[in-house]
Image (cartoon, rainbow, N blue to C red):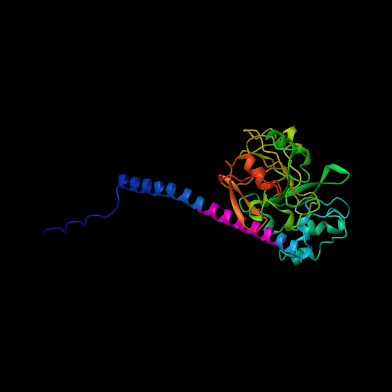
Amino acid sequence: MRLPRPRPRCGFTLIELLVVIAIIAVLIGLLLPAVQKVREAAARMSCQNNLKQLALACVNYEVAFQKFPPSNTLAPPFNGWAALVLPQLEQENVRNIYVLTANWYDPVNATARAAPVKTFLCPSANGSRTGQSAVPGAPGSPFAGAAWDYTNVSVVALPLLAYLNYPDPASYLTIWRGVMSSQGSSVAQITDGLSNTILVTEDANRPEYWVKGKRVTTLTPAFGGAGPGVVTGGVWADHQKGFGIDGASADGNTPTGECAINCTNAFEVYAFHPGGANAAMADGSVRYLRETIPVRTLAALSTRAGGEVISGD
């Protein structure tokens, strides 16, 4: 009597299993960079949309008041231009609790200045931080408030004008200023052209101090600051908005130089997007500025009436 033959078992050998695991690991390794690129592309587009909204809010403000909002408030009550355009940004919930007749740092505005506004934050930056800004009479004791990652360019700094051999650098407060100066500008004063003049750009992750893609815990003395690794001016309600284009050295540690973008976030154009930063122009359009842009070109894009010829870069 013959016994039935056992059926062969189906399954993987150990070697086959290891090969399958290796193939899956390779596929995951190839997939992760692609996912990261897609995620960053989405964050960059969201950042561009934020700047678009800010630019259109400022343009609508100009239509209503015949000038763009001022970069700095020179007399009390001290309020930043971001607070002035809250209605144009459809941020009525924040505007309703913000008291424009008081200073932004007064107790009555404590709740409003601590309110985060999504339009003011770049998705590629650290959204959980708290900004710090100086107040009149107490520059060494900055006030805290909700952070933001954008600001305007108020002027091309005098040291950079001298470095680039600009003509008549002493007139930089009138000729070489940006759109949103301390007095604001009308459309007619932007003789360089609305599409050729930066209105708002990125200066991300303040009060954290970043240089060439790395966080630094000690702020370089040449850039000033409020303490070790602290960059002021990052509160959206702050009345002292904007910065002067200086450029920086190649290592980002010294102001005035050929490094134009993503060198340092200490009052310069800085973003967390690979290879460049977003900027909204005075006509409401948004451009992506490559970090290889010559500092002279960035300076030319920052003036409202400099009469410069913009290069193709």
Q: Which residue is more in the foreground, 74 or 160?
A: 160
Examine the image and state in which quarter residue 99 appears. bottom right
Q: Residue 174 at x, y = what percent?
A: 78, 46
Q: Main secondary structure of the magenta part?
A: helix
Q: Position of residue 62 (x, y in %)?
A: 75, 61
Task: Between residue 222 and residue 6, name the one nearer to us.
Answer: 222
Q: Residue at x 59, y 42 (%)?
A: 293
Residue numbers of the magenta segment: 38-57
Q: Is residue 232 magenta?
A: no
- Give the image quarter of residue 51: bottom right
Residue 191 vertical placement versus 256 (above, below): below
Q: Determine the residue located farthest toward the left in the rendered image.
A: 1
Quadrant in the picture for the N terminus? bottom left
Q: How many marks?
A: 0
In the picture shown, does residue 115 fall above or below 36?
below
Position in image of residue 57 (x %, y %): 71, 61
Residue sitting nearer the eye, 197 or 136: 197
The one nearer the camera, 79 or 210, is 79
Specify whether residue 47 is painted magenta. Answer: yes
The image quadrant where one finds the C terminus is top right
Residue 271, x across and y down, in percent: 63, 46
Query: Residue 44, can we see it?
Result: yes
Location of residue 306 with respect to 48 vertically, above or below: above
